[in-house]
Amino acid sequence: MNIPEYDIITTLVAFSILVILIVSFFIAIVVQYQKRRRHHVEQLVALKNQYEQELLRSQLEIQEQTLRTISHEIHDNVGQVLSLAKLQLHSQQQQGQPGLQPSIDLLVKAISDLRDLSKSLHPDRIAEIGLAESIRYDLLLLQKTNAIDTHFDLSGTLLRLPPEKEILLFRMFQEMMNNVMKHAVAKLVTVKLQYGSAVLLMAVSDNGCGFSLDKPSGIGFTSLRTRAKLLNAQLDIKSNANGTTVALSVPIFDPKNPNSHL
């Protein structure tokens, strides 16, 4: 019996549609699976990043609390002991004992240096006077030692960031300066703090011997990179035989909420 050509065509069309539907169904399942898998991976990455940031915040909080304790210990205990020693030497000097003035002068300098160190370490003072003044104060202390010449370049409209951000930025500045003092063999260090409309730029430049960019982690840059990540900041390191520049670009405002500081 011959099957009409129309029925054959209809059957083929129906079969093709069925095949297309089945293939589309499986494709939809695969696409949906890929989407869910990708979303799951993104969630895992986000959770990992959140965990790392929370861990880093906890570590920094512990570090700041330790520095706060050390600052109090220097001010309340060590400073008082030295002050008492100074008073005793003054008393002995007034009783006619010669040759005590050089020792008194050294104690006066030691007490002053310890007070300066206590202020530099205490995070509450950094939060109180702000990032720019904290940097200016630290550079002034360094300049007094005659170990290196310093220059501070402050530009833009100064604004205050949240205290925890300014403390974190100041600790990064101290880390940069520590690297300069330990490794650069420099005679001049220039610190630039530029407040832009959306970005804060902090850069430390020296005229020292430089280093190989292939292995920057060995001289303290691992900590800087970790802290920069916490600030969503970009860290840029340039070094050659004429010196090193470490620059940090920090977003000032949240792109999703321009009226709020990060």
Image: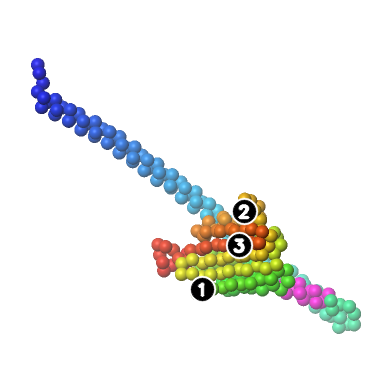
Residue 245 painted magenta? no
Instruction: State whether residue 18 is above or below residue 233.
Output: above
Kind of element beneath mark 1: strand
Q: Residue at x 65, y 67 (%)?
A: 189
Q: Which residue is mark 1?
A: 156
Residue at (55% x, 58% y) in the render:
235
Say which amino acid is labelled 2: Leu
The Cα–Cα distance between marks 2 and 3, rounded to whole angstroms, is: 12 Å
Q: Position of residue 141 (x, y in %)?
A: 68, 72
Q: Is residue 11 left or right of residue 190?
A: left
Q: CA distance from mark 2 to mark 1?
A: 31 Å
**First in residue order: circle 2 vs circle 1:** 1
Mark 1: few, some, or many residues within 10 Å (few <14, many ≥20)?
few
Instruction: Judge left or right: residue 212 versus residue 52.
Output: right
- Between the residue at mark 3 and the residue at mark 1, the CA separation in whole angstroms equals 20 Å
Where residue 245 is drawn, which disc sits there?
3
Q: Is residue 107 magenta?
A: yes
Instruction: Note whether residue 119 is visible.
Output: no
Find the magenta span and give its range: 103-113
The residue wearing badge 2 is: 213
